[in-house]
Image (spheres, rainbow, N blue to C red):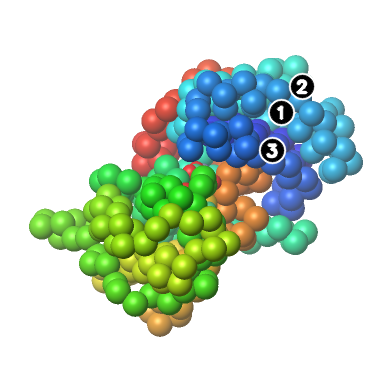
Amino acid sequence: MIILALETSCDETAVALMDAAGHVLSSRIASQEDAHRLFGGVVPEIAARAHLENLPPLLDAALRDAGVKLADVSAVAATAGPGLVGALLVGLSEGKGLALGLGVPFVPVNHIEGHALSPFLSVDGEAASAVPESFAALVVSGGHTHVFAFSGRGIERLARTRDDAAGEAFDKVAKMAGLGYPGGPAVDRLARRGAARRPFAVAQFKDRSLDFSFSGLKTAVRERLGELGRTPEEDAPQGLCDLMADVEEAIVAQLLDRLARLHDTRRFGVLSVSGGVAANTLVRERIPAWGRSRGVDVRVAPRALTGDNAVMIAFAGQRRLAAGRLGEGLGAVARSRWPLETLA
Ligand code: KG4
Ligand code: ZN
C-alpha cells in the first residue's frame, strides 16, 4: 500500500510518498519564497501559477527518489483546504486526475489535520509512531494558532487566535525591523544573539477566554523599535537582538499561559505541537520542558516537517483511508475555510 500526497495550499508545492506503516519513501518541497519576497507576503495568483509549473517535475522527482512507479500507487491524497483557493485547486485537480487515471481511491485532506498529526511522523526512516486515541494539538503557523482536542468523539476546537496568528506576529515584527520575509527564522536567529530583558505583557481577555491575541504585541514592539534604527540582520545592534528575544519570550509565554490553563481543566496526556512556528528554538525548548513538569507527553513535529509539506498530508490521508473516511472523495471542492472541528 503506497499513498501519494500533494500539497499546494499556500506557497510551498510539495509531493510525498508513504507506505502503510508510515515510512516516508520520499518528500519533495519546492518553496516559492523567492517569488513572493519582493511583495513581502504571499501573492495568491503567483502562488497558483508557480504550483502549476512546479508540480509535474516535483512528482517525477518524488517517484524517482522513492524508486516507485505511478502504477505502484494505491491511493492519492491532496490538500483540499483551508488555503488559497487558486493554489489548492492545482494540487486537488492533479490529485483527482491521478486517482481517476490509476483507478485508486482519492482522499481530500484538511491541511490543519496534517499539521496536527505531523509530530507522530519520523524523518529518519522509521515508521510513524502510534497516534493516541486522544490528545491535544497546538497548531502554530503563519495562518493559524489553534488548540484542538482529538478524541474518539471527534475533533473539538479549544482555542483560536482572535487576530494575528503567532507566525504572523513573528513576520510582522520582522518586517517592521527590516528583517525581510518570512520573518520567524530571522527573529529566531537574532534572539539567539540577545537576551530577554523587558518582558511584554501576556494578552488576556476579560472573559478569561483561552483564545490567543498577538496584535497588541506588534504595537508594543513598534514603540520600542522607534528607539533603534533599521539595519541589515548581520549588523543588528545588541538592542535589537535583545528586543527580538523579548518578542520570542512574549509569544512563547502566551502559548504556555493558554496551554497551562487548558491543562488545569482538560488534563490532556499528550500534546502535539506543529506548524511553522514549531521550528522556533524557544518553542522547542519551553513547551516540552513545561510538559515534563506537568506529566504531559509533548510531541513536537520534526523540524523538517514543521513547515508545509506533503508527508503530513500523506499520513492524514492514509489514516482516513484506513478508517474508511474518504469524506467527499472525488467530489471534494477547494475550500479557503474548512474548520477542522467540522470533520468526522
Ligand atoms: O506552516 P507554515 O510553513 O505555513 C503556514 O501554513 O502558515 O508556517 C510559516 C510561519 C511563518 O509565519 C514563519 O515566520 C514561521 O512559520 N516560522 C517561524 C520559524 N520558522 C518559521 N517562526 C518563529 N521561529 C522560527 N524559527
Ligand atoms: Zn501550514
Determine which residue is flagged by label 2. 102
Whether label 1 touches label 2, CB < 8 Å? no
Mark closer to the chain start, 3 or 2: 3
Determine which residue is flagged by label 1. 54
Q: Residues within 10 Å of mark 2 (few under 14, many from 20)?
A: some
Q: Secondary structure at mark 3?
A: strand
Name the amino acid, label 1.
Asn
Compare residues 12 and 6 and report the one nearer the observer. Answer: 12
Compare residues 298 and 12 and report the one nearer the observer. Answer: 12
Q: Position of residue 39 (x, y in %)?
A: 50, 33
Name the amino acid, label 2.
Leu
Q: Position of residue 157 (x, y in %)?
A: 32, 48
Between marks 1 and 2, how big is the CA–CA gap? 21 Å
The CB of the residue at mark 3 lies under 8 Å from ligand 1 = no
Between marks 3 and 2, how big is the CA–CA gap? 25 Å
Q: Position of residue 146 (x, y in %)?
A: 37, 50
Whether label 1 touches label 3, CB < 8 Å? yes
Judged by depth in the image, the label closer to the viewer, 1 or 2, is 1
Residue at the image position 50 percent from the left and 64 percent from the top: 236
Q: Position of residue 42 (x, y in %)?
A: 50, 33
Mark closer to the chain start, 1 or 2: 1
Q: Secondary structure at mark 2?
A: helix
Q: Is residue 4 left or right of residue 208?
A: right
